[in-house]
Image (cartoon, coloured by chain):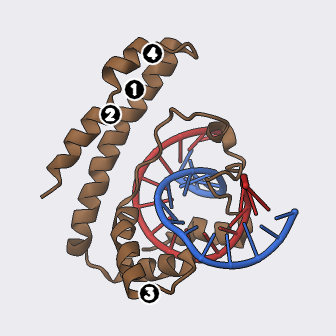
Chain colours: A brown, B red, C blue
DNA sequence: GATATGATTGTTTCC
DNA sequence: GGAAACAATCATATC
């Protein structure tokens, strides 16, 4: 929608620094090393893609490029109405909420432990794992 | 063998 | 406020 291509444009130019192991690029500050840092939650589009990829694979078992799936997903996403996107948006919002809790706990740990980690703390809360799982049940239906 | 790349959009994050 | 990174995915290519 509208100018969402701002980054795509730049990225396409050839600056795609994959998150995987690729050095994560210039902003690597976080990529430096923070295995404890919660990963960003998938946006509505990514939530939709999770299911779309499976379906696409079934429909195109011979497909090899994830790029193709991305293109197809993006095209379909644009064709979808808000009503159709609604469930994905809601899920994404839930993920976001959970991420907020996770990131807060992560920040708290940094602030409190400052590199020194209170394992005892984490063991008791482990925060999200529990929360997340129970919370996920909500959207089950 | 290990890692980068290909594309998509949305959200987050940093300056 | 804006620009850039990063989130998932996986066969393929390159080193």
Mark 1, chain letter? A
Q: Earlier in the sequence, mark 3 or mark 2?
A: 3
Give the letter of the chain under mark 3: A
Which chain's residue wears label 2?
A
Read off the residue under disc 2: A128
Alpha carbons under labels 2 and 1: distance apart: 9 Å
Up/down of B13 relative to A54, above or below? above
User: Which of the two labelled residues, at mark 2 and mark 4, occupies the earlier sequence position?
Assistant: 4
Write the residue at 30% across / 79% down. A80
Q: Label 1 belongs to which residue? A: A105
Name the image quarter holding the C terminus of chain A.
bottom left
Q: What SS does tag 1 mark?
A: helix
Q: Where is the N terminus of chain A found, in terms of image quarters?
A: bottom left
x 49%, y 75%: residue:
A70
Mark 2 neighbour density, 10 Å: few (under 14) some (14–19) many (20 or more)? some
Mark 4 falls within which chain?
A: A
Instruction: Specify few, some or many for label 4: CA neighbours under 10 Å numbering under 14, 14-19, or 20 or more.
Output: few
On the same chain, marks 3 and 1? The answer is yes
| Inter-mark Cα distance, 2 to 4 | 15 Å
Helix, strand or loop under label 2: helix
């Amino acid at each position: 929608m509208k100018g969402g291509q701002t980054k795509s444009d730049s990225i396409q130019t050839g600056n795609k620094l994959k998150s995987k192991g690729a050095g994560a690029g210039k902003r690597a500050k976080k990529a430096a090393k923070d295995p404890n840092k919660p990963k960003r939650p998938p946006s509505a589009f990514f939530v939709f893609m999770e299911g779309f990829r499976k379906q696409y694979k079934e429909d195109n078992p011979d497909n090899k490029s994830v790029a193709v799936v991305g293109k197809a997903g993006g095209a379909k996403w644009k064709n979808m109405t808000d009503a159709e996107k609604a469930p994905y948006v809601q899920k994404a919002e839930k993920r976001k909420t959970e991420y907020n809790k996770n990131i807060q706990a992560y920040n708290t740990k940094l602030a409190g432990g400052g590199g020194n980690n209170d394992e005892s703390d984490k063991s008791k809360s482990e925060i999200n794992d529990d929360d997340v799982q129970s919370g996920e049940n909500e959207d089950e239906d």
